[in-house]
Amino acid sequence: MAFTATYSAIAPCSREPNFYRDLIISLQAKGAKCVIDSSGETLSKSIEANPWLLKVNESEYLELKDKTADTTEGIITLLKNDTTLKNIIITLGGDGSIAKIHGKCYRITLPKITAKNATASGDIFLGKLLEALQSNKEIKTALIEASSFAASNCLYWYPHIDMNDVNEIKEQITLEEL
């Protein structure tokens, strides 16, 4: 299973709005599984290419759907009814994440921690998730591992992962199939 991660918070000025969409189409035609972690116009154009996985935060997801939701339950309802892509992960900051993978929905709840800085946590989450999936771990295990690595990073002022923190957090994470 080969993954190609396509990241772009903002499309570079020299790129046409359809650049990432066209890149995803080209790569997936060659058998790659593309992942998009973006926002704004880059995200909306990239979705047209039907990437294998979308990873966004809740505000990016709501903007993409042109919807509002006041609660996590509202976002879960939107996600359950979303037929745009087969695989979507929505990170919820300290509240964990929700995921729809191959038609099954999951809610990942994190333990309460004293976060110092969340910089790079979304990227760490996605990197660890893809590494776990590449290693053929089941999706539930991959989501828990990704969440524990991302949460560990939040405990420090600068991007850092401590395996003692990861293991402690991992034991406190709950994963519920919705």
Image: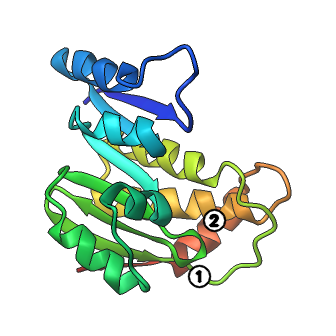
Q: Disc 1 vs disc 2: Cβ atoms closer than 8 Å?
A: yes
Residue 120, percent from left and from top: 67, 48
Identify the secondary structure beneath mark 2: helix
Q: Disc 2 designates what residue?
A: 151
Q: Disc 1 designates what residue?
A: 111
Q: Which amino acid does label 1 sit on?
A: Pro
Badge 2: residue crowd in 10 Å (few <14, some 14–19, many ≥20): many
Please say if 111 is above or below 49: below
Query: Which residue sits furthest right?
Result: 157
Q: What residue type is labelled 2?
A: Ala
> Which residue is pictured at 41% across the width and 59% down the height?
63
State which quadrant residue 88 falls in.
bottom left
* Front in this rendered view, residue 87 or 13: 13
Q: Could you tell me if residue 23 is visible in this image?
A: yes
> Which residue is pictured at 57% across the width and 22% down the height?
12
The quarter of the picture where the C terminus appears is bottom left
Residue 47, percent from left and from top: 28, 40
Please say if 174 is above or below 29: below
Identify the secondary structure beneath mark 1: loop
